[in-house]
Image (cartoon, rainbow, N blue to C red):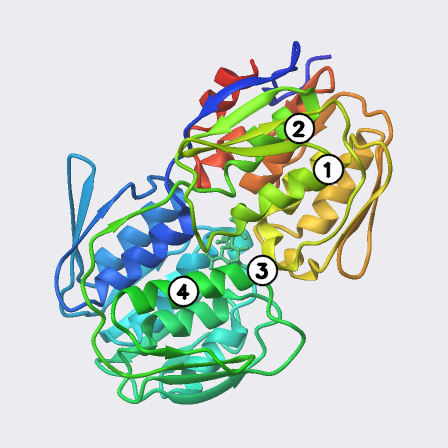
Amino acid sequence: MQQQGWAAPRARGPVTGRVTVPGSKSISNRALVLAAIADGPSHLTGLLTARDTSLMRAALVSLGVGITENGGTVTVTPGSLKGPASVDCGLAGTVMRFVPPVAALADGVVEFDGDPYARERPMNVILDALRTLGVRIDDHGTGRMPYAVSGAGSVRGGTVTLDASGSSQFVSALLLAGARYDEGVDIRHDGKPVPSQPHLDMSVTMLRERGVQVDDSEPNRWVVAPGPIRATDTAIEPDLSNAAPFLAAAVLTGGEVTVTGWPATTTQPGDQLRDIFTRFGAEVTRTGDGLTVRGTGRVQGVDLDLGEVGELSPVIAAVAAFADGPSYLRGIAHLRNHETDRLAALEREFNALGGDVTQTADGLEIRPKPLRGGRFGTYNDHRMAHAAAVVGLLVDGLAIENIGTTAKTLPEFPELWSGLAG
Ligand SMILES: O=C(O)C1=C[C@@H](OP(=O)(O)O)[C@@H](O)[C@H](O)C1
Ligand SMILES: C=C(OP(=O)(O)O)C(=O)O
């Protein structure tokens, strides 16, 4: 019987080629937010065009920000922020967490809603933090979507203690808008470690590039001084996390894949793929401005703490499923708060193909077994679709449910993948 879904290309031999991936989701959405509340117009090039960035643009425009596009350059012109407005967050963590602190600066009511599963993603930490900083929010007592931010045109700001162990985005959200609050913000984290440190570094670096004073010298504390955010023209780097499946194809098939435009220095978590694929047994080299990964024919099991780079986990799990021994992926309990509960979803989908994957309290244990074809569920999660495509390289008859979900951050994924692997 034919499986419903996108027939994943099966590798006919070593996968070889060059891939150019579009702009980073995380840098794009930060650049948009910072430009929207800056002291003048900013020009952004290489901005990602995908569902998450379209939602961010629409959100900012609905608040009164001007956004125009001309020949690949996006110009963002701050306006006086106003409600009433309604914001569709889709399933984008960066929209649902980063926009409320901006909406708090608007004059009027701003309503937020999103995809059905967006209502399952935790919001209470950021909503409570904003209340502490003087913002009126109505979430019907749920701590989740839908909620309304009643902006008063300014925010007092000040000191807030929160538990950001569930998502680094709670801290980034306050960092990005905090300079525009009357007293700035002094954010203190109290709880288990905050995940995704590179994303926190990305927020701090981008603020400093725009003249904002941020003191992050004390662990678990970030102090943002009040002041203007300097309008800054920005060239967005390629999305290194979205490079993961393409490079994984080389690792697993003994091929050679180059991702072009790999930055020499970056705050993106995807840069850690250089070390991660080396540990699996691949050879990783810089070539001109690209990064080349060569599969050696050997894929070793790994024991990795992925707490800093959680968003890479689905593709790493897919590589681990074909290693020559078990793998242990740790430090990623917070993946239960992502586009879906990724630990449960990966366990379920691999085991449905005959795999042997077990969730632990904070990760996954993956014992490689021969996999059979079937339908791989994606749960509206772009990275589940990337993981499925990697599996499909080595398994006959794999059908990926809703490949269109890759539009969240990489609408070109099906074409790019077929072009490389098909
Ligand atoms: O700030 C950001 O741009 C992101 C932070 C991380 O969130 P978590 O800390 O919730 O994992 C990451 O997983 C997400 O894809 C993007
Ligand atoms: C967790 C992710 O996204 P979001 O920005 O929606 O949290 C992700 O892209 O892996």
Q: CA distance from mark 3 to mark 2?
A: 35 Å
Q: Position of residue 132 (x, y in %)?
A: 44, 88
Residue at disc 4, CB closer than 8 Å to ligand 1: yes
Q: Mark 4 or 2, which is nearer the eye?
A: 2
**Disc number lying in front (3 or 4):** 4
Mark 3 near ligand 2 (CB under 8 Å)?
A: no
What residue is disc 3 on? 120
| Three-letter code, disc 2 | Val
Looking at the image, which is closer to me, 162 or 200?
Answer: 200
> Do the numbered discs 2 and 1 sit on residues whose CB atoms are within 8 Å?
yes
**What residue does disc 4 label?**
203
Kind of element beneath mark 2: helix
Quarter of the view holding residue 302? top right
The amino acid at mark 3 is Glu
Q: Secondary structure at mark 3?
A: helix
Q: Indicate which disc, 3 or 1, sits on the residue closer to the N terminus.
A: 3
Location of residue 152 in the rendering, given as x and y in whole percent from the top left corner: 24, 82
Q: Is residue 82 above or below residue 251?
A: below
- Label 3 and label 4: CA atoms lie apart by 25 Å
Instruction: Tell me if 236 is positioned left or right of 139 in this view.
Output: left
**Marks 3 and 1: which is nearer the front?**
1
Q: In the rendered view, does 63 fall on the left or right side of 339? A: left
Q: Nearer the viewer, mark 4 or mark 1?
A: 1
Give the quadrant of the N terminus. Answer: top right
Q: Secondary structure at mark 1?
A: helix
Q: Position of residue 352 (x, y in %)?
A: 80, 33
Quarter of the picture containing the C terminus is: top right
Query: As shown in the figure, which amino acid type bears the numbered disc 1?
Result: Phe
Kind of residue at badge 4: Ser
Which residue does the numbered mark 1 point to in the structure image?
280
Query: Which residue was labeled with disc 2?
Result: 251
